[in-house]
Amino acid sequence: MQVEDTAPPAISSRYRFFLWMVSFFAVAALFIGLDIATVWPGAEALNLDLALSNERGDYIPAFTDSLLTEVGASLFEKADLFFLFPRVLSAIILITTAVIYYRWGQKLFGKQTVQLQLLLFAASLYLPLFGKIATADSLLILGQVGSWLSLIYLIRSGRTNHQFYLGLFTLLSSIADPVITLEMGIILISVFTLRYDYKVIFRQAWMLPVIPLLAMVVHGWNKELIYFGSGYLQNILYCLLGTLPFIGFVIGGLRDLVFKLKRREELAIILAAALFAGLASGSPLFGFALCAIGGKQLQLYFTPNYPWNNWVRGPAILHLIFALIGSFLLLLGGFVTFRGDGYRAFLGMVAAYWIFSLFAILGIYGMRRDFTIGGTVLSGVLATLFFWVQVYPYFETERNWPEELVELYQDQDLDYQTRPARRQVGRGSKVYVDREDELINNARPYFRRAEILGEDVKTSAYSLSARPGTDTTVVDDALELEGRSVGLLYRFMITDK
């Protein structure tokens, strides 16, 4: 079934230019900063640490990253650049997801609707971030979106090639996280039985639950190596917050979805299957489904007699008000943290976000399609781009403490007169870094790369710890640097156990 667009079929040259411009900005935001960003704590730190260890063969993504890390090490000397190519791979996988959805989604939703859905995906404040980190989260996004689309085509056509694609994407998703994939598969099958014959679904989609179970047995479950593997409520909340630039269309879309589910419309069931599967498993499919629902509603909003105007306008107005308050808080935080330079850096980001959000509101109330689409999309895309171009470099100057601490640790010519309370730590002595402590575990890849990482606290001569930046306690015989793990300031120090 080909679903016709309710919007005019002709695409103007101005709109085509807008599509290419947003695509360029979104791709640029993906690749900017990959070469300078310090490893992020949590899953990326543990994944890269595993990639540099002798156990890297236990996890396929880590093994792949180990090969790419060796390529980076052979080309660059700076430690951060060792991890460039694993991050580039994540960015390429995320772009591949968008391309596949653009090609396959057109037969379901129509070309212009798919374009709007992908525009909102680019404007999302959360999911695109997984194209900038060296974890298998991007592979999970690709696998889940591909499995969802493949299952739809398989149920409706029964063709063998769609069964192959379903198996392939389910395998990719299972490599990233088999438990999330298993939960997703069960929910997808359950929701699709609302419209399709369950016997046909079970006969054709048997691999959805089987492949994750086999992957769990053969490959194991390494949930701490992807960000979606832990923190269910946190990921669901972040997916919801990521839709803030287009929250009005998401709320209106959910209301429209409930209405159409009562009538068991096919497209409503397709979108509901992705939404419920992502929500139940706490997976990125939930965030992608919100983008798809919002994009469909953005297209329907300008049709005659659209019934959910207030459901779109109310949340959009509230978002604009809270965005203004948040902008002032961010400007204040930027000034307090980085003084005048930080204020100016944050100003460009929050101004782009709020001004284009205002344009979107003007378009929503004035029924101006160009203002609505342009303001909604550019508010998210440009805010993300300006963050990585203008704001993040200020954080990076204080986030690169792991590399600096390794260099300081290995330095054999410390100035004892300027650091009277410090002493030289002997070269070759191991430093224990707790892998469970997300304040410091992003130092593990750097310490392992320098061959000074201790695996056991009992056999390590020293240990790494963190104290709040407000703690002024003097620690004797400590090698210390001040820096940030993600946002707040801490004192990072190597001390005797």
Image: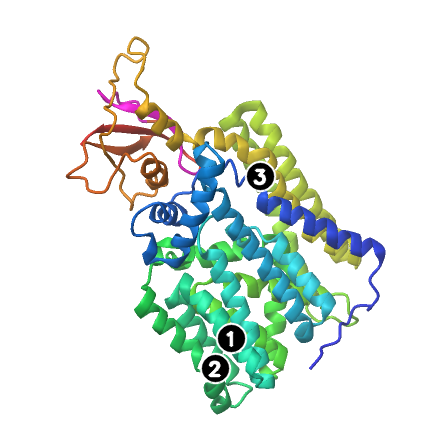
* Side of 121 where 9 appears, left or right: right
User: Mark 2, mark 3: which one is toward the viewer?
Assistant: 2
Q: Mark on residue 205?
A: 2
Q: Residue furthest top?
A: 417
- Per the image, label 3 sits on a secondary structure element best described as helix
In the rendered structure, which amino acid carries the disc numbered 2?
Ala
Name the residue at 58% across, 61% down.
Answer: 97
In whole angstroms, how far apart are the C-alphas of marks 1 and 3?
A: 36 Å
In the rendered structure, which amino acid carries the disc numbered 1?
Leu
Image height check: is 183 above or below 324? below
Q: Residue furthest front?
A: 74
In whole angstroms, how far apart are the C-alphas of marks 2 and 3?
A: 41 Å
Tell me, yes or no, whether the two marked residues, 1 and 2, touch with CB atoms within 8 Å.
yes
Task: Confirm whether residue 122 shows in the render.
Answer: yes
Image height check: is 418 above or below 181? above
Magenta-colored span = 471-486
Q: Is residue 187 magenta?
A: no
Q: Position of residue 401 (x, y in %)?
A: 39, 30
In the rendered structure, which amino acid carries the disc numbered 3?
Trp
Between 333 and 195, the one nearer to me in the picture: 195
* Side of 492 where 256 appears, left or right: right
Q: Earlier in the sequence, mark 2 or mark 3?
A: 2
Image height check: is 489 above or below 233? above
In whole angstroms, how far apart are the C-alphas of marks 1 and 2?
A: 8 Å
Q: Earlier in the sequence, mark 1 or mark 2?
A: 1
Image height check: is 328 above or below 273? above
Q: Position of residue 118 (x, y in %)?
A: 65, 60
**Residue on which disc 3 sits:** 388
**Residue on which disc 1 sits:** 166
